[in-house]
Image (cartoon, rainbow, N blue to C red):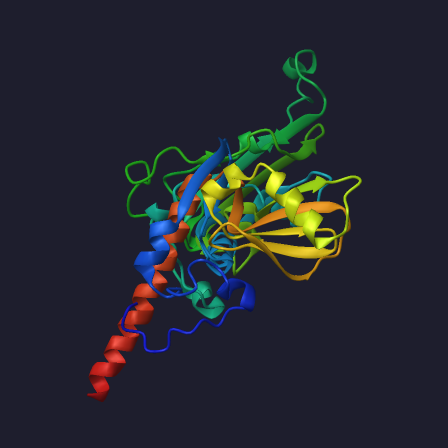
Amino acid sequence: MTNIRNKKSTFSNKAQSSQFSPNLWDLSVVLEGVKINIIKKCIGFLRLEILNLDISILNSLRRVMVSELPSISPSEIFIFKNTSLINDEIISHRIGLIPIKVDPRLFVFRSSMWYEKEHEIKNQNNIIVMSLKQINYSFLKSFKKSSKKIRKVMSACIKWNPYGSRVPYQTKTFFNNCQLNSAPNIKHCFLDILISRLKSKQRIFLESHCDKSVGLEHAKYSCVSVVWMYSHSTTVVVKDAESTHSSTNKFLKVLKLSKIKEYTKNFTINFNNLKYKMNQKGEFFTFGAASNNSILNIKRENHYFLCIESIGSLKPEFILIESLFFIHKKLFKFFRNIIIKQLTKS
């Protein structure tokens, strides 16, 4: 990073006015001031407080989480028998959007070209086979008194088949080894999702073949439901405040801004139709007009909150770490290609 000749920033004037503007492209200076705090952590949700990091880096991290991290989801569903009221396409759509709890690192990608997928032989390294077989036996005499006439087919009824497909020649799926040794118990993340209802003598028999892919191909492969970020700001409504510049400066000095000074001295204040900013010495000065009157809005620069909401297949902290590794791999490939081109020219 220190060998870059052009170190001028391409960001806006607001980004250039930050405290890291003299050394914006110096990695050691940027990482020295970066702070990450965990605000909230629960099942499937993570909220982080990130300080002194540019918003473009956070946005690239968010885009990687949404569309470029791999996960496993049903890609092909073979329906052998369906006598329920719901059509085959609707059942396939409902099953395809149910997340599967499995580590995607245990499997490999299939071919990305559709014409290669048609002739590709699926094996235990790139396919997970899950089967569903449900029949309503309420027409039998032994089941009439004890069971209900309508049977619910839930997502818990879909079972993992580690030995492969029951019809391998029709589905072109051939397992050489069992998946019990390579992968743990595979199941759906939510077991209480209703798929269909069966009346007497109705049945459903199908196989779901799941493969590994990314969210760029389809939304069902995205391992997060929502990833969003917002900037830190504090708004205070002030009554009976004078509009003169001198009285505003007196009011700002009376405010208890000690906690804000501990974080950083770069934040913006909107008050009385004037936009104030604190300099390195802790003094306020005006540099523009604000929109709201009698409203004090304190907004810090490079202070953001990042929220990650997982669909259940992967933990949010695992998603964050994998996205950081993914960006690191991209940078490594980028610099490697530059070095190779320089060596070939020389």
Relative to the observer, which residue lies in front, 148 or 290? 290
Q: Is residue 108 visible?
A: no
Observer-nearest of 217 and 242: 242
Q: Residue furthest right?
A: 240
List x then y, in percent, for residue 173: 40, 52
Q: Residue at x 42, y 38 (%)?
A: 161
Determine the residue positioned at 51% across, 38% down.
258
On the image, the x and y values in percent for residue 191 come to: 55, 30
Q: Quick check: 26 above or below 154?
A: below
Tell me where residue 335 sits by quadrant: bottom left
User: Image quarter for residue 22?
Assistant: bottom left
Residue 39 position (above or below residue 166): above
All told, the count of numbered labels is: 0
The furthest residue to the bottom: 345
Q: Position of residue 96 (x, y in %)?
A: 57, 47
- Please state, as top left, top right, bottom left or bottom right, where the C terminus lies in the image: bottom left
Q: Is residue 93 in sight in this rendering?
A: yes
User: Which residue occupies the extreme front position in the image?
Assistant: 246
Instruction: Look at the image and tell me in which quarter the N terminus lies.
Output: bottom left
Image point (24%, 76%), residue name: 339
Left or right of 199 in this view: 300: left
Side (left or right) of 38 relative to 88: left
Image coordinates of residue 312 in percent, x first then y, are: 51, 37
Q: Quadrant of residue 276?
A: bottom right
